[in-house]
């Protein structure tokens, strides 16, 4: 009886110690779920979801504080991916957050820009180059199209321009057959 | 030199469509007059878009560079004739999408005057310089893939080059441009091959020609007698024997596995047209400004023409006599070709064939029916893929799965769609899935770089805030120490709030000034202001 108790106690101590060691040795920094969610989000950093950036929104989703349908740039596709990852039910995009739009980049009208640097401060991804009283310009390859620079501009010189398809970015359409119009019978 | 000495191998799958080659081989290659305008697209090859070098109104000579290669993974573009640049603007491309790209529009002056050309003494130059020269001469693969040739003219890092495979198979129906080139200019092709063999330091060069072109095989063999280490081999006619990996398999027995290049096995493959272009570039100093183009299909006299890049397709086809009923042109063959968005799109480096298409020649495909899992496509696939699996997953937009089935090993030869009893346009599904996957990869790369910049910016803002606070604290400490020496007690109470401390210090200074003023001229009841400020400061714990 005593031997059995001691054996169980010994095992318990041994296993507890090894578990404790493993939890220290293999400690995961940060929340891996947040990173997985963050990887799905489009990194536009536009804040349309109501959080200051994609990472905070990912954190809120992981904590169950936010719904998965608040990201307009991620679109329907993004919501499906989030639903798959989290095992939640798909929901259509929350209209409160915004609507899905074709990808656009900001454009500075160089004749109007006064070099106030307000857009520089607003850009979450450092895609605007310029300095005080110098002409600002958007590095379009870096622009995520978040539109955060549009409102602060005091002279309204920033407009959003939809990114046109080029030969290099053109995609083959989903094959579909052409439905032949059937000759309609004359009513008369 | 004898074709029968070499052991040949075989690849799996393949089909034998009607070749339709005879009509366009009856007449020799013809030259064309100058069209009214050349529309030379700047982007004609794989890699970076060349940078325009000319301006509107500028006079150019034949062979003058109009587009400079953008980086090493790009190729130059040259003027097809002498004349004036009348526009540099986006024009419709020879591309299924119907999109425009930047083109240099040249109006010929009729003199057709060459720029000064000089033979390159490539023997006395390092190989890297010869490769740069070929890049600037605009030489790209003329088999259809238009990959910059200078990039390919390099042996693998670890494996010495053994066999240089020259592709004269020309397996696609209707196309005869390589056939005619081999019949008429065999020696010049082989001189190009000899240059390539030297650049690659390859032990041998083997030219593979499908055995349905006996005239080409004979003329090439006659010419090859003068060259060392070049063998002409007739290979069995089976589509797609002209695929690079398929021809390498047939001639050397090497099967290049997934994710590897043929150079890893000491083999490199070039088209015969490319060999000819390299001969012209090095021995004559002439950049690539024209190629042989087969005009076939719904025309009176199918024939091969030497066409300069930028010539409108309808101008070329008119000389072969376009028959009534032609509704569009197909660039390339019926198996892998692309329908052009308009009749007047320019001939580019990839244009090996123009087929005048009519509803009678290529009737609209019968309706697509469900897949019956017969497996015919897998038997026909020359790259040993499972087309039906890729089809289901592409159709379901399950792109990860398509990649598990090695979608990107698909060469889009069209054998699977050719044998499909349900008339499923399989290749269209693969093309859709490929471009969709590329788009997603681009999106993902952009998102990743945006995340990095966003985090770097947040760190910077955080750092700036911290530095500002530190600076402020340092200044406060300095202010306090000076205040303590002046003996003001009010500051001690605000120790931990630097801002408040600063305000208090400023107030103390003001008080001291006032006190000075009082000393100078004592007035009644100035204490009211000081008594107000002191309780305020005193509230701080």
Image (spheres, rainbow, N blue to C red):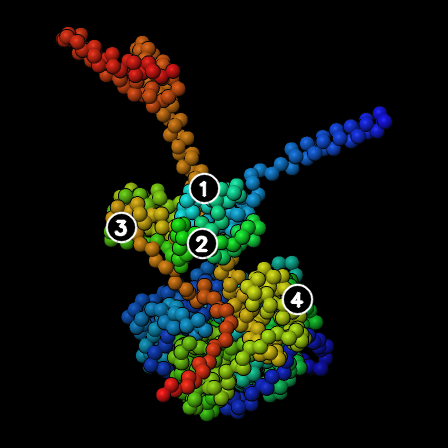
Q: CA distance from mark 4 to mark 1?
A: 43 Å
Q: Nearer the viewer, mark 1 or mark 2?
A: 2
Left or right: residue A133 versus residue B238 is left
Residue in view at x 34 percent, y 23 percent: B499
Would you name the residue on which mark 3 appears?
A: A156
Residues at discs 3 and 2 in contact (Cβ within 8 Å): no
Q: Is residue B22 above or below residue B424?
A: below
The numbered disc on residue A93 is 2
Q: CA distance from mark 4 to mark 3?
A: 58 Å
Residues at discs 4 and 1 in contact (Cβ within 8 Å): no
- Are dots 4 and 3 on a single chain? no
Screen quadrant of the N terminus of chain A: top right
Q: Nearer the viewer, mark 4 or mark 3?
A: 3
Q: Position of residue B53 (x, y in %)?
A: 36, 65
Would you name the residue on which mark 1 appears?
A: B456
User: Which chain is mark 4 on?
Assistant: B
Q: Quadrant of residue B313 in the image?
A: bottom left
Query: How many numbered circles does the render carry?
Result: 4
- For label 2, count other residues whose C-alpha is less than 10 Å away and answer few (under 14), some (14-19) or many (20+): many
Q: Nearer the viewer, mark 3 or mark 2?
A: 2
Q: Is residue B95 above or below residue A74?
A: below
Screen quadrant of the C terminus of chain A: bottom left
Is residue B318 something one can see in this rendering? Answer: yes
Residues at discs 2 and 4 in contact (Cβ within 8 Å): no
Q: What is the secondary structure assignment of the residue under circle 3?
A: loop
Q: Nearer the viewer, mark 1 or mark 3?
A: 3
- For label 3, count other residues whose C-alpha is less than 10 Å away and answer few (under 14), some (14-19) or many (20+): some
């Amino acid at each position: 009886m005593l031997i059995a108790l001691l054996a169980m106690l010994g095992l318990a101590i041994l296993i507890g110690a090894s578990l404790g060691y493993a939890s220290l040795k293999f400690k995961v920094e940060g929340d891996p779920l947040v990173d997985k969610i963050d990887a799905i989000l489009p990194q536009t950093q536009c804040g349309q979801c109501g959080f200051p950036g994609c990472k905070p929104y990912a954190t809120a989703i992981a904590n169950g504080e936010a719904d998965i349908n608040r990201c307009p740039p991620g679109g329907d596709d993004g919501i499906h991916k989030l639903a798959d990852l989290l095992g939640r039910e798909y929901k259509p995009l929350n209209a409160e957050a915004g609507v899905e739009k074709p990808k656009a980049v900001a454009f500075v009208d160089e004749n109007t820009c006064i070099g106030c640097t307000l857009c520089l401060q607003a850009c979450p991804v450092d895609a605007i180059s310029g300095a005080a009283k110098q002409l600002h310009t958007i590095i379009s390859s870096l622009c995520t199209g978040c539109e955060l620079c549009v409102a602060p501009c005091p002279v309204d010189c920033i407009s959003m321009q939809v990114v046109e398809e080029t030969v290099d970015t053109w995609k083959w359409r989903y094959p579909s057959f052409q439905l032949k119009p059937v000759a309609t019978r004359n009513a008369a | 030199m004898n074709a029968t000495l070499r052991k040949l191998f075989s690849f799996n799958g393949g089909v034998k469509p009607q070749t339709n080659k005879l009509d366009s081989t009856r007449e020799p290659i013809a030259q064309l007059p100058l069209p009214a305008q050349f529309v030379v697209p700047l982007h004609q090859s794989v890699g970076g878009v060349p940078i325009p070098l000319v301006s509107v109104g500028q006079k150019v000579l034949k062979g003058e560079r109009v587009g400079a290669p953008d980086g090493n993974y790009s190729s130059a573009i040259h003027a097809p004739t002498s004349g004036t640049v009348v526009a540099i603007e986006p024009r419709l491309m020879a591309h299924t999408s119907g999109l425009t790209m930047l083109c240099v529009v040249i109006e010929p002056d009729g003199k057709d005057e060459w720029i000064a050309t000089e033979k390159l003494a490539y023997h006395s130059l390092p190989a890297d310089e010869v490769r740069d020269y070929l890049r600037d001469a605009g030489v790209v693969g003329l088999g259809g893939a238009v990959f910059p040739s200078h990039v390919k003219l390099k042996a693998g890092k670890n494996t010495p080059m053994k066999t240089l495979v020259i592709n004269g198979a020309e397996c696609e129906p209707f196309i005869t441009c390589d056939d005619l080139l081999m019949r008429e200019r065999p020696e010049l092709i082989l001189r190009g091959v000899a240059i390539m063999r030297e650049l690659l330091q390859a032990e041998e060069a083997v030219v593979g020609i499908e055995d349905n072109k006996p005239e080409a095989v004979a003329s090439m063999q006659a010419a090859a007698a003068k060259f060392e280490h070049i063998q002409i081999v007739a290979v069995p006619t089976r589509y797609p024997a002209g695929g690079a990996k398929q021809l390498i398999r047939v001639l050397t027995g090497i099967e290049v596995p997934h994710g590897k290049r043929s150079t890893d096995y000491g083999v490199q493959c070039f088209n015969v047209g490319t060999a000819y272009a390299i001969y012209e570039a090095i021995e004559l100093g002439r950049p690539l400004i024209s190629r042989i183009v087969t005009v076939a299909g719904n025309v009176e006299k199918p024939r091969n023409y030497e066409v300069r890049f930028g010539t409108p397709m309808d101008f070329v086809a008119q000389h072969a006599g376009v028959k009534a009923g032609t509704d569009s042109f197909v660039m390339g063959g019926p198996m892998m070709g692309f329908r052009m968005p308009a009749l007047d799109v320019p001939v580019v480096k990839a244009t090996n064939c123009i087929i005048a298409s009519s509803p009678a020649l290529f009737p609209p495909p019968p309706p697509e029916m469900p897949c019956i899992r017969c497996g015919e496509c897998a038997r026909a696939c020359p790259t040993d893929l499972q087309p039906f699996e890729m089809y289901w997953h592409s159709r379901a937009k399950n792109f990860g799965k398509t990649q598990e089935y090695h979608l990107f090993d698909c060469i889009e030869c069209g054998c699977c769609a050719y044998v499909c009893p349900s008339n499923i346009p399989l290749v269209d599904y693969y093309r859709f899935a490929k471009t969709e996957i590329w788009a997603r990869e681009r999106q993902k790369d952009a998102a990743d770089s945006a995340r990095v910049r966003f985090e770097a910016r947040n760190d910077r803002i955080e750092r700036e805030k911290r530095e500002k606070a530190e600076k402020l604290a340092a200044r406060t400490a300095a202010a306090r120490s000076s205040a303590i020496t002046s003996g003001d007690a009010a500051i001690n109470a605000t120790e931990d709030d630097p801002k408040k401390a600063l305000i208090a210090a400023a107030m103390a200074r003001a008080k001291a000034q006032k006190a000075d003023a009082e000393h100078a001229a004592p007035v009644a009841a100035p204490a009211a202001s000081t008594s107000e400020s002191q309780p305020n400061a005193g509230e701080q714990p």
